[in-house]
Amino acid sequence: MSKVLIIDDDAEICSLVGEFLRRNGHEVATAPDGGRGLAAAAEQRPDLILCDLEMPGMGGQEVVSTLRQDRRMGEIPVIFLSACKDRGQIRRSMNLGGDDFITKPAPLPEVLETVNARLLRQWNVHQREEERLQQTVEVFAGIIHDLDKSAAGIRWLAAKAAAKDGREKQIIDQVRQSLEARQTPPSVPSAVPATGRLPEQPLLIKDANRRQFLKLSEVKALMACGEYSMVHWGDNGQHMMFRKALKMWQQELPPEQFVRVHRQAIINLGFIDYVEKAGEGRLQVHLRDFKQAIFVSQRETPDFNRCLKHFQARAAVRS
């Protein structure tokens, strides 16, 4: 579930658009003017902002300009929802950092489609950034480890992280955690249920057209995006974003079938089509009817190989 902040002095617009987005799976907050909208954005960190242009006090242009100068909120997508038809003013608003523009009055399905498209684009951007970050983290952790100064390196990284904030702190912490993991023996998979089967826990799926419960055994993969995750299932590329971090999924999913293969992905071993080597000792996993290959990080490779071996052994017994 994604969080959308609506900044508009028209209470009816906030109510109608907000309720429609809620019915279609989004969490919604509202603010009646630009000043309170910025305060709400700083406190709640929405995934997307719908903002009017002309409001008493601080208008939409000042809102987006202020956001883009804030390192904590600068990447939040902003869609202008305004009755303004002045092309020059619209162009200036977009040049200040707006991501899209919807002219009032707009059909609610059009607003939902624009919001979902922008959220998906933002998720794809974060996914590519996180994959590059994961590779960088492993390189730096490997360099420190190879220098045989792991303990000193961990202490140094901890001190550096304490003096930083935001994205810099996150990257340093991830390098430190990766280095610590290299010094810790891989965890042993938990005991397998006597039946050897995956417990069927329901997962609620909601969108504009349907509401259904999905069995966990039908889930193919979960891909991370910060505090969110994209859950993939089915043969036709069905997917949906949830406001739930991958770490939380890892604690809840049955470890005998769902395995974390790198920081950004958990896969269902039951959907593996084949595994191949991708150079530099890395593995790539191909899932059935899943377009992209998923790489296995060097850190997770031992656990992945062991869990896959256990899973295949159980499958052989059941057959």
Image (tube, helix red, strand yellow):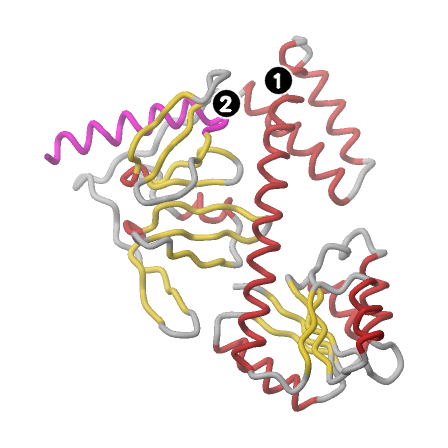
Residue ranking furthest to the bottom: 12
Verify whether residue 255 appears in magenta.
no
Highlighted magenta segment, given as a residue range: 296-319
Pointer 2 local density, CA inside 10 Å: few below 14, some 14–19, many at least 20:
some
Whole-angstrom CA distance, mark 2 to mark 1, is 10 Å
Amino acid bearing label 2: Gln
Farthest-out residue, right: 57
Instruction: Name the element at disc 1.
Output: helix
Q: Does 249 sit above or below residue 119? A: above
Say what amino acid the circle numbered 1 marks.
Gly
Residue lying farthest front? 87
Q: Which residue appears at 29% of the width and 56% of the height?
A: 215
State yes or no: discs 2 and 1 in contact (Cβ < 8 Å).
Answer: yes
Which residue is located at x 49 percent, y 48 percent?
Answer: 248
Residue 35 visible in the displayed image: no
Q: Which mark is residue 142?
A: 1
Residue visible at 52% across and 78% down?
109
State the image quarter where residue 27 is shown: bottom right
Q: Is residue 254 above or below residue 305?
A: below
Q: Main secondary structure of the magenta part?
A: helix
Q: Is residue 272 left or right of residue 96?
A: left
Residue 260 visible: yes
Quadrant where the C terminus is found in the figure: top left
**Residue that badge 2 annotates:** 298
Residue 151, x across and y down, in percent: 67, 16
